Image (spheres, rainbow, N blue to C red):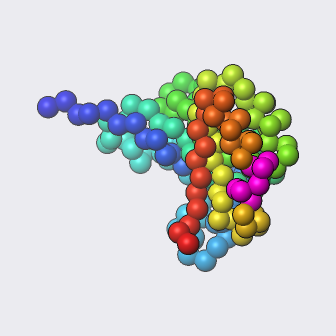
Amino acid sequence: MDSIPVIDTHQHLWDLDLFQLPWLDLPGMDVLRNSFRMADYQQATRNCPLAKSVYMEVNVHPDLHRQEAEYVLALCEAEGNPMSGAVIGGSPGESSFTGYLEEFAGNPFVKGVRSILHDPDRPRGMCLTPQFKENIRLLGERGLSFDLCMRPA
């Protein structure tokens, strides 16, 4: 029987030599406190009939969103790996979001933007502001998804 090809729609990779992930400093994250690069992913999925994967941002320090996006989009373009798209990190509540999004306009690998709403550094109710809502509308107008991550109340 032929195996059914798998599309991993929520692939996380990180390189701690390149990016700071503040959440890795939290208690209980010791097991994750090392780099997990494409070679590691390919080794971990070697027995899976993996056809494609879509990168999901990993909550890098906000100052590094652009660098993270550029890093993963370069992986999407590279031969020899299954990554065919990316949901990049971004902050729709920020006034700079429109310009940030414009930098990636037309890139066929950008599928959407994700924001971590439960981050303690983000103001409560941020997603209810006119700026945030307008930027979410902008994503829809561009055919991009908005993925959010939040803890239950």
- Residue 109 image point, x, y percent: 60, 28
Quadrant of the frame with the C terminus: bottom right
Residue 125 is left or right of residue 76, and the answer is: right
- Residue 123 image point, x, y percent: 77, 65
**Residue 81, placed above or below residue 131:** above
Tell me the chief SS of the magenta region.
helix
Residue 70 is left or right of residue 3, and the answer is: right
Q: In terms of image quadrants, where is residue 72?
A: top right
Residue 126 is left or right of residue 46, and the answer is: right
Q: Is residue 151 visible?
A: yes
Q: How many marks?
A: 0
| In front of the other: 91 or 70 | 91
Quadrant of the frame with the N terminus: top left
| In front of the other: 9 or 17 | 9
**Residue 107, placed above or below residue 19:** above
Query: Looking at this rendering, what residue extends furthest in the left direction?
Result: 1
| In front of the other: 58 or 115 | 115
Residue 2 is left or right of residue 117, and the answer is: left
- Residue 87 image point, x, y percent: 60, 40
- What residue is rendered at 63% in x and 47% in y? 114
- What residue is rendered at 41% in x and 48% in y? 44
**Residue 78, placed above or below residue 6:** above
- What residue is rendered at 73% in x and 30% in y? 104
Instruction: Give yes or no for residue 131 being in the magenta stretch.
Output: yes
- Residue 58 image point, x, y percent: 62, 52
Instruction: Give yes or no for residue 37 being in the magenta stretch.
Output: no
- What residue is rendered at 61% in x and 77% in y? 27
Read off the magenta span. Answer: 126-132
| In front of the other: 49 or 46 | 49
Q: In terms of image quadrants, where is residue 142?
A: top right
Q: Is residue 71 visible?
A: no
